[in-house]
Image: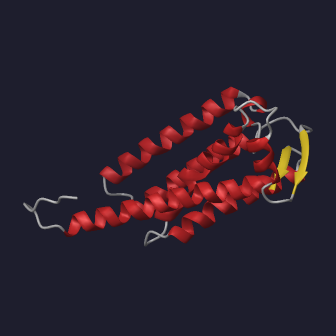
Amino acid sequence: MSEILRTVPLPLVGLAVIAGVVAALAVAILMRHRRLDRAGAARVLLAAALLVIAAVTLLRPAGMWAGVNLVPLRSISALWTDPNLLPGPRWQIYGNVLMLVPVGFLGALAVRRTSFIAGLAWATAAALVVETVQLVFVLGSVDIDDVLLAALGGAVGAGLAVALARAVARLSRTPQGVRVTG
């Protein structure tokens, strides 16, 4: 998943983002008309997020092979500590984490009862699929650190979803007219 912005045609990214926005609008309309519940809405938006990730990470010319890294933390350490690198490559680390936060968030909400494990599983599975497709079709690089960073992003997203669900549940139990202070 590294070096994405240099190798992905920007019109494809734009198209994927537009598809995500259209999905969000469709979900808002369907929820307003009570045709879709929270879990169903999360599933639709999860599918849109996965489509965006697939477009950004997989739709690029074949043959741009950068190798395989199966040693955990090797790439992260190199990107973080190499004094010859500018701070820019660190954004590969941040990008791999941030890209999977929505998947963790929506994955946690896509089940009947909000689940941290479901969000983490969705994000990790998405990263494993991307890395496997990159290996099979010789696209970019295959890096175990990308999976670790994606799992971290998924955990952050899932944690946010669980915290939000708890806050909403707490607020919905508060009797009307009672002021909540915190």
In depth, the one of 26 and 109 nearer the eye is 109
Residue shown at 32%/57% (left/top)? 34
Quarter residue 125 falls in: bottom right
User: Where in the figure is residue 31, as x and y percent of width and height?
Assistant: 35, 53
Q: Is residue 23 visible?
A: yes
Say above or below: 171 vs 66. below
In depth, the one of 88 and 62 nearer the eye is 88
Quarter residue 24 falls in: top left
- On screen, residue 67 versus residue 79, left or right, reads right
In depth, the one of 124 and 95 nearer the eye is 95
User: Where in the figure is residue 132, as x and y percent of width and height?
Assistant: 82, 57
- On screen, residue 136 versus residue 35, left or right, reads right
Residue shown at 44%/72% (left/top)? 112
In depth, the one of 130 and 45 nearer the eye is 130
User: Where in the figure is residue 166, as x and y percent of width and height?
Assistant: 35, 66
Q: Which image quarter is the C terminus in?
A: bottom left
Residue shown at 76%/54% (left/top)? 145
